[in-house]
Each structure stands twice: as structure tokens, then as C-alpha cells.
Image (cartoon, rainbow, N blue to C red):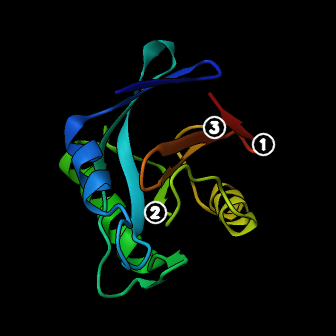
Amino acid sequence: MEIKIDKYTICITESVLKVLDSYKQTGNQNEAGGIILGRVYENNVVCITELSEPNEFDKSSRCSFVRDKNMAQLIVDEAFDRSGGKLIYLGEWHTHPERNPMPSWVDKRMIKKQFKKNIINENFLILLIQGTESLYASIYNGETLIVD
């Protein structure tokens, strides 16, 4: 799947789409989420190749998800080392129990906090929210969330 957002072309691999699909809240499931990993190429092409999946240290309910930052950092470090520094942290993903998800004020605050507090490789972070029918995608550039 390819999504154009501003000057970026975001490629999402089939394996990533399968993970997102597997966590759709079509019943009474709690929200799920994790981190987005991938590579950035020339001409602002961003390829999302991996997602972390929820683990026992994360906290979730029907309408909220908070990932464990220590476990997430271990996942980022391992991916970076395994790939020789090519696989990097690109952002955050989670689910919403709604057809066509939109970020809540909590989601907006979270992505802004991640941008400000983390050492990131690029000048943006991606926010993905999987709904029951569609996928929301945006880029946070340090000032605003940009959608396609």
C-alpha cells in the first residue's frame, strides 16, 4: 500500500497490513498498539516494514492503549542493531473501536510528546490508527499533523 502525505510517499508492506488487520477491534477487544519501524530512502520515500505488537508490559482498555517505553526502546535498539543502522523508529500505531478513526486529543498529545522527548532519526513521526474499516495515517512534523 502507498499513501501520499505532503512531500512523503509512505509504503506499507503487506506483512505490516496483516498485523494491523489482526488487531481490528471488531468485537469487544481492547485497543492494541506499538511502534512503527522502517527505512527512509531518497526522494522522501518512507517504507514501513515492521510493527511491534502489544506485550505484557503495555496497558490497554477498550478505548485506550499505553505502550511500555522500556520494552519499546529494547525493540528499537534490537531492530537498529540487526539492520546495521538502517531500520529506525518511525512513529506510533494503535487501534480505535470506530470505523473511520481520527486521532483524539490524547493521541495528538502523545505523538507531540514522542517527537519532543525522543531522539529521532528524521524530522517527522508517523501516526497510524487502525479502525474497524479504514486506516488513518498522518505525519507529525513538529508543528502539526499532516494527513493525505
Label 3: few (<14), some or many (≥20) within 10 Å?
few
Q: Closer to the camera, 127 or 86?
A: 127
Q: Closer to the camera, 134 or 15?
A: 134
CB-based contact (under 8 Å), mark 2 and mark 3: no
Look at mark 1 in the image and give the residue it sits on.
Answer: 144
- Label 2's element? strand
Look at mark 2 in the image and give the residue it sits on.
Answer: 95
Looking at the image, residue 33 lies above or below residue 50: below
Q: In the image, what residue type sits under mark 3?
A: Asn
Which circle marks residue 73 in the picture? none
Q: Closer to the camera, 143 or 96?
A: 96
Q: Closer to the camera, 131 or 87?
A: 131
Taking the spot 71% from the left edge, 59% from the top edge, the residue there is 108
Q: In the image, what residue type sits under mark 1?
A: Thr
Look at mark 3 in the image and give the residue it sits on.
Answer: 123
Q: Is residue 94 left or right of residue 5?
A: left
Q: Quadrant of the N terminus?
A: top left
Q: Position of residue 53 (x, y in %)?
A: 29, 66
Q: Quadrant of the C terminus?
A: top right
Q: Earlier in the sequence, mark 1 or mark 3?
A: 3
